[in-house]
Amino acid sequence: MTQSGLRAIKRFFDDDEEEASPKKSSQASIPIPWSASPIRPVRPTPLKNTINTEDLFSKIKQASDSLLAGEKEVIKAKQKLDQKIAERGNSMKSRGLETASSRPPKRKSEVVELSDSEDEPTPKRRHVQPPQASVPPATAASTAVKVMPWEQDHKNMKLPADNQPLVTNKPKVSKPLDLVNLSTQQKNILSVVMEGKNVFFTGSAGTGKSVLLRRIIKELRSKYSKSQDVIAITASTGIAACNIGGVTLHSFAGVGLGAGTPAELAAKIKKNQKASSRWSRTKVLIIDEISMLEGDFFDKLEKTARIVRRNHADKPFGGIQLVLTGDFFQLPPVTKGSSPKFAFNAESWSSCLHHTFNLTKVFRQKDQAFVDILNEMRRGIISDSAAKVFLARSGPLPVDEIEPTELFPRREDVDRANHERLQRLTGKSHEYVASDGGSAEERTRANVLANFMAPARLVLKKGAQVMMIKNVDEQLVNGTVGKVIDFKTESEWADSQRGYGSSLEGDNEADASKPKDKSKSKAQVQKWPVVEWKIVGSRHTRTDLIRAETFKIEGPNNKVEVSRMQLPLILAWAMSIHKSQGQTLERVKVDLNKVFEKGQAYVAISRATSLEGLQVVGFQKNKVFAHPAVIEWSKTLSS
């Protein structure tokens, strides 16, 4: 006996009726006796006459209810996981962040003290990853948390068209910062460095000196992977040293302020076992911002190195390979009284350096006319046409969500401007107090911390304009400006990213007056700023929960000399010209009224990526000047 396929379909949709009848259920379990003869064509019965639509919709509803119930169970399990992660983070006191309870908070304010136990070893340096959308870390410095299968939704997210803003916690990242492509000129310099040659490379603002230096450090660490303490990463200033993860040259040398003769400095080093050991094992000495180092100190250090490294006394700098970089047209050495003696005027300069390179390709500005004006300005030249351009930029920039960052020559003007703007904002204040540590002597540590970009104390409100001071990925880099739009706990942020609850919880007095759940740990109730960033070079935005990071300077064997745990943010309504050195700003306001030093006007204006994003206040031709000695020396350079 033959059986049509459509009847089998009918039987599938009639399962409920079959289950209701024991007889039918029994028959349904009997195999169909298919005939061995060919199947005869059967006129099919119309499908609409064989399907019970009420039963079909009932089955669909049951399946839907089952899926919803399963999803709720998943959500409950995930919330329990979040709670366990937060509780575990609270127990990790050495790496956790706690709200201060030792003193009463100010009215409408919250104070957060960032704790860092001295009993626990400082965690090793790690690459900063973008904040995770679904599973927040247990603490600001926690280790990686396993990502569950249902949290993989946005890994392949693509940027929308330019007229559509992107608001995402974890944008697509194409490649790490240290793999940025180098130009042919930069590759040539890198090759010479890897051959062990002494190198100095310079270039105007925006030519990629910092990018190249980071790559050189990366490649040298790979070359000396088994003994990385042979690489000394230093800079002439504390800010520059922090930017490259190094120490000041004075700190490395162990010579204090450098007073005394080379013989006296060498004797001082030999009495200091740590300093003496550093000099003995160092094979490569990197000095960033060499342009701010006095020539006399360079000579003194070179002679000291020969004495300390007596087995190589016949070689420049005692046989240590030198990698130096800086722009002498920017800020000069700080001196007391007389005109500075630049490093290139040092007696030992030419004998120490095998190769000098001048980077010429500008990456920061795309407008060649603007680049040409900046190159003239760098040499202290302002043509009438250039003056007209800057005078035309005196008006305020078009209104935008992100206000232009104002650059001042003096720090007191910066502090005043930022304080005034913060006071205008209403709402609750959130104060974050840094936790400092490290093995360095207290005096040395204090001097280094004074030059950290991360502040000892940071007060934020909703609406505050802030700047990222760490490189996170290719979109969120050091210098990216954004605005605080909310404050959230880890769990609130995780819920908002999954679509549960409001994306903006509010931060008003009514919210602050709600009774606290005393059963929750401090880590669970800790609120962090939510920042909406304007992505440099596009119309897109992204939103991130910003947690505290550890800024550290490491010595030999990865031992942490100085550390600070703090949010990687600073207020960005105003900034000093000195701190802006090396930054790239899309919208910037430059006040030249109080410019007092050679190169200050050039450094400030060259931070801008375009004329359209630049406002110049108080422009006068006599505000632009370069040092005559630098102009003469630059004539000897070739690319």
Image (cartoon, helix red, strand yellow):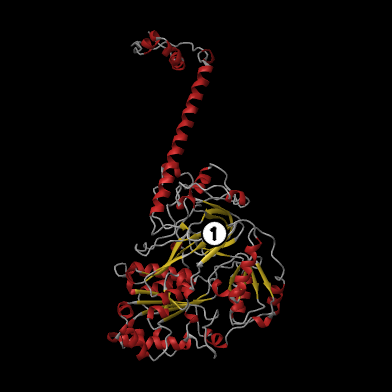
The answer to whether residue 508 is seen in the rendering is no
In this picture, residue 619 sits left or right of residue 219: right
- Residue 254 % position (x, y): 37, 81
In this picture, residue 316 sits left or right of residue 464: left
- Residue 601 % position (x, y): 62, 77
Badge 1 element = loop
* Residue in the picture at 53% in, 82% down: 332
Question: Farthest residue in the left direction?
Answer: 311
The answer to whether residue 445 is seen in the rendering is yes
Residue 496 drawn above or below residue 370: above
- Residue 138 % position (x, y): 42, 52
Crowding around mark 1 (Cα neighbors within 10 Å: few <14, some 14 to 19, many 20+) is: some
* Residue in the picture at 53% in, 41% down: 500
Across the whole image, how many numbered discs are drawn on residues? 1
Quadrant occupied by the N terminus: top left
> What residue type is disc 1 on?
Pro
Which one is nearer the viewer's eye here, 225 or 238? 238
Which one is nearer the viewer's eye here, 409 or 417? 417
Which one is nearer the viewer's eye here, 430 or 380? 430
Residue ID for mark 1: 105
- Residue 205 % position (x, y): 55, 73
